[in-house]
Each structure stands twice: as C-alpha cells, then as structure tokens.
Amino acid sequence: MMRLSARHEAIVSQVTPGAKVLDVGTDHGFVAIALVKRGIASYVCASDVNEGPLWRAQENMELYGVDFPLYLADGIIDVPIDNIDTIIIAGMGGELIAEILSKRDLADRKLILCPHTKAHELRKSRIHIEKEVLVEDGGRLYPIICATQGDNGIENEADFYISPHLREDPLFPEWVQRELKKIDQIIRFVSRGTQADAAMKKQLWYKGELEKYANLRRDS
Ligand SMILES: C[S@@+](CC[C@H](N)C(=O)[O-])C[C@H]1O[C@@H](n2cnc3c(N)ncnc32)[C@H](O)[C@@H]1O
C-alpha cells in the first residue's frame, strides 16, 4: 500500500471515483501515482514546468509499477485536456495557481487546489469555490479548495482571507489562532521597519477580522 502525507491524502480524497485527472506541477508524482495505484481515477496524466521533477516522477512511477503520460509544460496551456475532467494544482503559491488557471478556459472541470501561500489571492481570482477543507501536515495547516472556473461571487473583502467555507471546519479555530500569531509577528516587524502605513493598516484590519472569530469561539 502506498503511504501518502496527510496533505496528499487529503488531495486524493477530493477526487471523484472514475475521474480523468491532470496533476499540474506534479514534482515527485505521488498524488498522480496514488490515483492510479488505488484505482480511483479512470485516467491520469501529470505535468511539470521543470525536467528534474519529471525525472523524479518517472522514477517513482517505475518504483510503483504504474505508467501514465508526463508533460513538460508551463501551466496548462500546452497540455492536452480534452478528455480531462479534474485538474489538481497543489504546492504552489496562490498567485501562481491563479495565473496558471487564468490562461485557459477550463469550463466545467473540477479544480482541486492547494495553495501553500496567499490563498486569498487564489480566492480573488476567477474560481467559484464549492468546498474547502483544512489539513494539518508537518506542523502546518493547508487549505484544500474544490472549485470550478467562474465568478468567485465573494463581495466581502474579509471572505477572501477568512473563507466562509472553512468556518465550520474542525481545524478552523486552530487556523485562526495561528493566523493571529503570524499577524502579531508581522505587526512587530512592520512597526520596527520603514514600511508604509498602508501595510500596517492592512495587517491591523486582518487582525480585527480574525479576532471576530477568535472571540466568537470563546463566547460560545
Ligand atoms: C512544491 S512542488 C509541489 C509538488 C506537488 N504538487 C505537491 O503538492 O506536493 C511544486 C512543483 O510545481 C512545479 N511548477 C512550478 N511552476 C509551475 C508551472 N508554471 N507549471 C507547472 N509546474 C510548475 C515545480 O517545478 C514543482 O515541481
């Protein structure tokens, strides 16, 4: 049985059985390999912008006795996706994931996205979020976003940062506490440096928004 990290396991668990999957930025290929090995996906292919990761993926495919197409490509533009109904993009910054998605019409395809930083930038882009969960792995909390391409429908700026989809997640209170800790560190750093007022104002605004949820949990 192939063992996956908690984050990879959480990504794999969002794939609908029988899906035809493209894993963009596959690196080691573990997610794509698990989808084949466990018989979850009916078709799998994977891509990466760098050759090194694709060699790694190829080696792992041989190790686990699976075979599927690998593409050397920047994002999705040059990858054949006519038969693909699910696209996974994980382990990159939210801005990069948003940029990759913006370059191609992905119609009704299911997007499974796991930004490592700046998730708010991804939520601000043209994705319509259907579901989000938090997963803890290696001491960090990661959001896993299931979406389709389209209007994000978010009107409140705070919702880009504190996703409404995460507020019932069992890890949400812990996520709020960790964000507050990070903000306090940033505020200390900004107040010591020469950053403009705007940066400090944004951090104080975010702290205020987070505190609404920290206090809510304490009051209930
Ligand atoms: C940190 S690894 C994440 C690997 C795997 N997806 C995961 O979540 O564990 C990021 C991978 O994305 C690839 N990558 C970065 N920019 C990319 C792009 N524009 N198109 C395709 N792959 C990209 C990198 O080469 C690297 O292998």
Image (tube, rainbow, N blue to C red):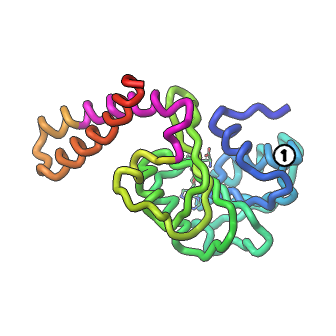
Res 193 → quadrant: top left
Where in the figure is residue 54, as x and y percent of width and height? Answer: 69, 54
Q: Quadrant of the N terminus?
A: top right
Examine the structure image and report whether residue 125 is included in the region drawn in magenta.
Answer: no
Q: Quadrant of the C terminus?
A: top left
Outermost residue, front direction? 220
Tell me where residue 90 appears, x and y as whole percent: 59, 50
Q: Is residue 97 above or below residue 39?
A: below
Horizontal side of 215 relative to 124 (left or right) equals left
The answer to whether one can see residue 178 in this image is no
The segment highlighted magenta reads 165-186
Q: Residue at x 53, y 64 (%)?
A: 127
Location of residue 184 in the rendering, given as x and y in whole percent from the top left corner: 25, 31
State whether the magenta stretch is mostly helix, strand or loop.
Answer: helix
Front residue (pair 30, 55) = 30
For image coordinates 86% across by 56% down, the residue present is 18
Dot 1 falls on a residue whose secondary structure is: helix
- Find residue 135 and report its image quarter: top right
Apparent side of residue 120 relative to residue 82 in the rendered image (left or right): left
Q: Is residue 185 magenta?
A: yes
Pick the residue in front: 109 or 165: 165
Q: Quadrant of residue 170?
A: top right
Residue 2 versus residue 40: which sits nearer the camera? 40
Q: Is residue 218 above or below residue 14?
A: above
Q: Amino acid at mark 1?
A: Glu
84 is higher (above) or lower (below) than 202: below
Q: Please report the residue visible at 41 percent of the width from the left and 53 percent of the height from the top.
A: 160
Residue ID for mark 1: 62
- Please state the horizontal and vertical placement of residue 66, each as a whole percent of the image: 87, 49
Compared with residue 3, is residue 78 higher up or lower down, i.e. above or below? below
